[in-house]
Amino acid sequence: MLKKTLAVALFLATGSAMAAESDLTVSQLATSQSTKAEFSKMVEGHTLPAWVTKGGTSTGTKEVQLGDNRYLVLESCKPHDCGSERIAVLYSPKLKRMMGLYSSVDEAKASEQLAWLNVGDAESIDGKTVLYAALTGSLENHPDAFNFK
């Protein structure tokens, strides 16, 4: 009986933790005591608009596998103008590691500027692929195509 109770408690605790992770937003990563230092490291040397940390329009969190590590993929965009500014973040709760991609579109010039944030050599190709796929909608449309083991 005790084993069943412990198993149920563990299952509920794990489910709650997973639900909490799936509700994360980019602005929460920027302001939460447990993640803001890593977020600051990720954006170091870049000036991002205030909506990134104050709360943009967010979509649901997704998960991808890069090598042996699971990453959460978070997306956010400028409120009422998602087409002009967007950000995607890969976050590994286990590794306490974040990397991101900020996109700014200038419609008058028909151009897009990308700022890669804290993307290291180990994750360079696959990490950049996932981040850009998140911004373009490819990750949403083909979620299983972006797990790299």
Image (cartoon, rainbow, N blue to C red):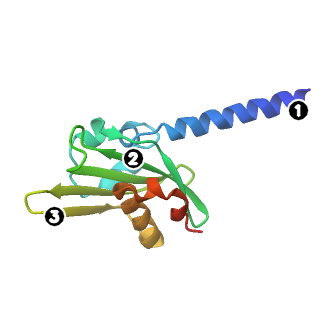
What type is the residue that disc 1 sits on?
Lys
Residue shown at 46%/39% (left/top)? 24
Q: Which residue is mark 2?
A: 37
Residue at image coords 81%, 34%: 7
- Decide if residue 9 is in sight here: yes
Q: Which element type, helix, strand or loop, lies under badge 3?
A: strand
Outermost residue, left direction?
108
Q: Earlier in the sequence, mark 3 or mark 2?
A: 2
Q: Residues within 10 Å of mark 2 (few under 14, many from 20)?
A: some
Q: Amino acid at mark 2?
A: Ala
Q: Could you tell me if the residues under marks 3 and 2 are in contact, i.e. CB atoms within 8 Å?
A: no
Instruction: Give residue 100's position: percent from left, percent from top.
Output: 36, 57
Task: Read off the residue under disc 3.
Answer: 111
For the N terminus, which image quadrant?
Answer: top right
Pick whichever, 107 or 28, lies toward us: 107
Which residue is identified by label 1? Answer: 3
CA gap, disc 1 and disc 3: 60 Å
Q: CA distance from mark 2 to mark 1?
A: 39 Å
Hey, what amino acid is under mark 3?
Answer: Ser
Q: Residues within 10 Å of mark 1 (few under 14, many from 20)?
A: few
Q: Position of residue 94 (x, y in %)?
A: 57, 52
Label 3 Cα crowd, 10 Å radius (few <14 / some 14-19 / many 20+): few
Q: How many marks?
A: 3
Residue at horizontal 88 percent and vertical 32 percent from the top: 3
Q: Which mark is residue 96?
A: none
